[in-house]
Image (cartoon, coloured by chain):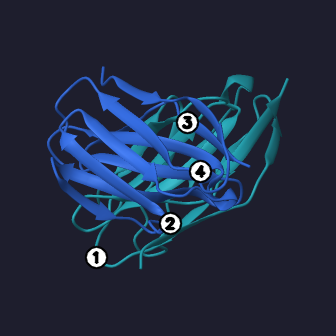
Chain colours: A blue, B cyan
Amino acid sequence: DAGITQSPRHKVTETGTPVTLRCHQTENHRYMYWYRQDPGHGLRLIHYSYGVKDTDKGEVSDGYSVSRSKTEDFLLTLESATSSQTSVYFCAISVGTGGPGANVLTFGAGSRLTVL
Amino acid sequence: GDSVTQMEGPVTLSEEAFLTINCTYTATGYPSLFWYVQYPGEGLQLLLKATKADDKGSNKGFEATYRKETTSFHLEKGSVQVSDSAVYFCALSDQGYSTLTFGKGTMLLVSP
């Protein structure tokens, strides 16, 4: 079972403050993803990583940065949070050696962020 | 770019009714197609998938057939249960198989 832990699970912050969400996996899967889920928009890809220090942008990457210095951790940072970034954030990993087109995408439980 | 279009919900059914959730896609090349399900308060989980034209994915009584000629991957189940109440997402992979593009999701509500 691919173990994925997201932290924090809930966070309330104020506009303009920095926020970092953490995704931790217990195995050595190569591909990791950050999505945001919003009503009426479904899931939209923010950034993804295909290895340590290898990352790429998704369709809604503006205002977000990521880092992956270890295989097991993928961090999502909002440098200066805005109300439009209020959302539920999901981390996912592709279980296997390839990407999710070839393997199962396994999701974490989500992090609910509210920006006031 | 790649895109997925699903029917809007909520879809409201009585227990034992027949379910169809429509999904069509736009993609270059020949993507793999997926249905994911999200139960309340949880992350998404894979329901079924199909990797090439005319393939049928199936799981837990749900089925979907990859139709290249109509660029569709409709989800069906012959007899829904209350426990099937969830949000269903259609998705496709890009040609490099490195990312998934999701539709907006369709909420299914099944009443006893």
Dot 2 lies on which element? Answer: loop
Looking at the figure, which quarter contains the N terminus of chain A? top left
Question: Is A89 rendered above or below residue A106?
Answer: below
In this rendered view, identify the residue nearer to me: B59 or A113: A113
Give the CA distance from mark 4 to mark 1.
27 Å
Output the chain of dot 1: B
Label 2 neighbour load within 10 Å: few <14, some 14-19, many 20+: many
Using the image, name the chain to which the residue with label 2 belongs.
B
- Can you tell which of label 1 and label 3 is closer to the viewer? 3
Q: Is residue A66 left or right of residue B59?
A: left
Write down the residue under mark 2.
B72
Secondary structure under badge 4?
A: strand
Tell me whether the residue at label 2 lies in contact with that at label 3, contact meaning CB atoms closer than 8 angstroms: no
Q: Which mark is residue A111?
A: 3
Mark 4 and mark 3 in contact (Cβ < 8 Å)?
no
Image coordinates of residue B50 in percent, x first then y, are 35, 51
Three-letter amino acid code of the residue under disc 4? Gln
SS assignment at label 1: loop
Residue A10's spot in the image, x, y percent? 61, 31
